Amino acid sequence: VPFPLLVDRLALSGGSLHLLDERPQPPVELRYEALYLELRHIGTRAEDNGEFSLKASGSSGANLDLQGRLGLQPVRAEGRLQVAEIGLTTWWPYVRRALPLELTQGQASVASDFRLELREGLHLQLDNSQLQLSGLRLQQADGQPLLDAERLDLASAQLRLSPGPQLILSDGQAHLAALQLHRPGEQPLLRLASLEAGNASLDLGARQLVIGQLRSQGLE
C-alpha cells in the first residue's frame, strides 16, 4: 500500500437498515432500527490488527452481536458471532424455490467462534459452534401438516472450510426433541420423543461421514 491508512476509531450509532428483496415471492424484507458499528485501530499495513464490533436489532428479529479483530493485508478476521431469535419464516421464500413446502413457524439461534482469511480463496474455521432450531411447523403446499419439531440442537467442536471446496467437521453433536411426521388426513405417521447423535465427523473431500453414537427414545 503506497499510502498507509490508519483509522483510530470509527463509530456508527443509532443507525437503521432496511433490506427488501422482491425476487422471491413473497418478498423478503428485513428492518433493523438499532444498528451500532465500531472500528478501532484499523489499518492497511500487514502488521495492523484492529478491533471491530457490530450489533443490530429490530422488528425483523435476528438480534446480531459480532465482535473480534480485523486485518486488511490480507483480509482476515477472528472473533465471536451470536445471532438470536432468527424468524425462519422471513427467510423461507429462498428455500421454497427448491423445496415446495410451507414453513408456518420456526425460530433459530446461532453462536460460534470464528476465524476467516481471504488467502488464495476463502479459509473459514468455526469453533465451539451451536445452532438451535425451535418450534418448527412445516406444511405441504396444500396446507396439510407435514412435520412438527419442538427443538433441534446442533453443535460441533470445529468446522473448517477451505478452497476446493474442502469441508471438515469434528465432534459433531445433535439432539432432536418431540418430532412428529404427519400423513394427510390421518393421525401422525411417526412420533419420536428424542433422538441424539454424537461423536460425528465429516470429511467432504474424502466423502466420509462417521456417527459414533446414535440413540432414540419414544419411537411410535
Image (spheres, grey):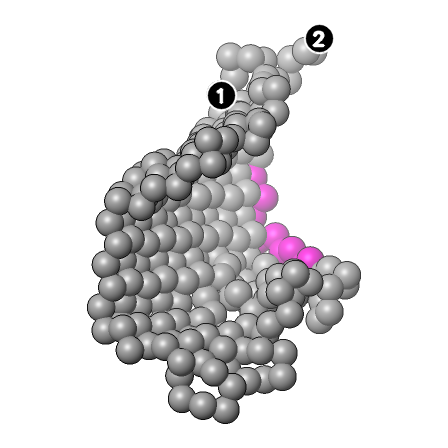
Q: Position of residue 118 (x, y in %)?
A: 58, 25
Assign a secondary structure to mark 2. loop
Residue 13 position, x and y percent, is 56, 48
29 in relation to 212, above or below: below
Q: Quadrant of the N terminus?
A: top right
Q: Identify the main secondary structure in magenta.
A: strand
Give me the residue at 45% from left, 66% from top. Answer: 107
Q: What crowding class fits label 2: few (fewer than 14 Cα within 10 Å), some (14-19), or many (20 or more)? A: few
**Which residue is most to the right?**
23
Residue at x 23% of width, y 73% of height? 218
Question: Of 48 and 184, which appears nearest the observer?
Answer: 184
The amino acid sitting under disc 1 is: Asn
Residue 49, labelled with which disc? 1
**From the viewer's perspective, is 189 left or right of 33?**
left
Q: Which mark is residue 129?
A: none
At x 58%, y 44%, the residue is: 12
The image quadrant where one finds the C terminus is: bottom left
Residue lying farthest bottom?
185
Magenta region: which residues? 11-19
- Element on which disc 1 rests: loop
Q: Is residue 92 visible?
A: yes
- Between residue 85 and residue 169, name the one nearer to us: 169
- Res. 2 mark: 2
Give the Cα separation between the discs numbered 2 and 1. 18 Å
Q: Nearer the viewer, residue 64 or 53?
A: 64
Q: Amino acid at mark 2?
A: Pro
Q: Is residue 13 magenta?
A: yes
Task: Report x, y in % for residue 215.
Answer: 23, 59
Is 134 above or below relative to 15?
Answer: below
- Give above or below for 107 relative to 7: below
State the residue in front, 86 or 165: 165
